[in-house]
Image (cartoon, rainbow, N blue to C red):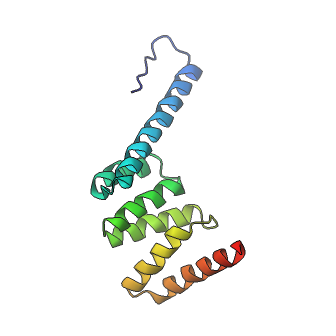
Amino acid sequence: HYAIDMAGMSISDAENETDKFKKSLESELLKTGNKLVAEKKYSDAIPYLEELTQRFPNNADHWERLGDAYFQNKDIGDAHQAYLSAFSLDPNGPRPGMWRNIVLIAKRIDHPVTAKRFNEMLEKFEGDKK
């Protein structure tokens, strides 16, 4: 656990300590969420991953991880939204697992345009790997 005693600190030192605290918090939320996902305790992992995305909303990896937990927990609508957040933050990042899940979700909610788009991205990614 991380505590900050800012008494007598310069602003620069206080900002440095705050940054360390944020990194520590991010690491702990991610570690706990990942551990619970690995144990297949998806509903228990979701609050940690939600907190992670609320505190660090510009990290596509965190959004993808949250989407994975929702997807495995059969929360399809929430998974779709989390994946779209990840995609909007990192549209060019290679995320084939997420793309496969988006294709499955799009087919399930009868959205063929989305399914086709992400399926094409998957095929291109897998073709580029060969």
In this view, the residue farthest toward the top is 8
Front residue of this view, candidates 100 and 84? 100
Return the x and y of residue 92 as percentages of the image width and height.
Answer: 64, 67
- For residue 82, what is the image quadrant? bottom left
Q: Is residue 67 left or right of residue 15?
A: left
Residue 60 percent coordinates (x, y): 53, 57
Q: Residue lying furthest left in this view?
A: 43
> Where on the picture, by quarter, is residue 96?
bottom right
Q: Quadrant of the N terminus?
A: top left
Q: Residue at x 41, y 58 (%)?
A: 66
Q: Quadrant of the C terminus?
A: bottom right
Image label count:
0
Percent position of residue 100, x then y: 50, 75
Image quadrant of residue 87? bottom right
Percent x, y of residue 124: 66, 79
Give the residue drawn at x 50%, y 82%.
114
Between 106 and 125, the one nearer to me in the picture: 125
Name which residue lies at 55% across and 65% down: 88
Image-based side of 114 in relation to 38, left or right: right
Taking 11 as reference, is 130 above or below it?
Answer: below
Residue at 62%, 66% (x, y): give it: 94
Query: Relative to residue 130, is residue 41 depicted above or below?
Result: above
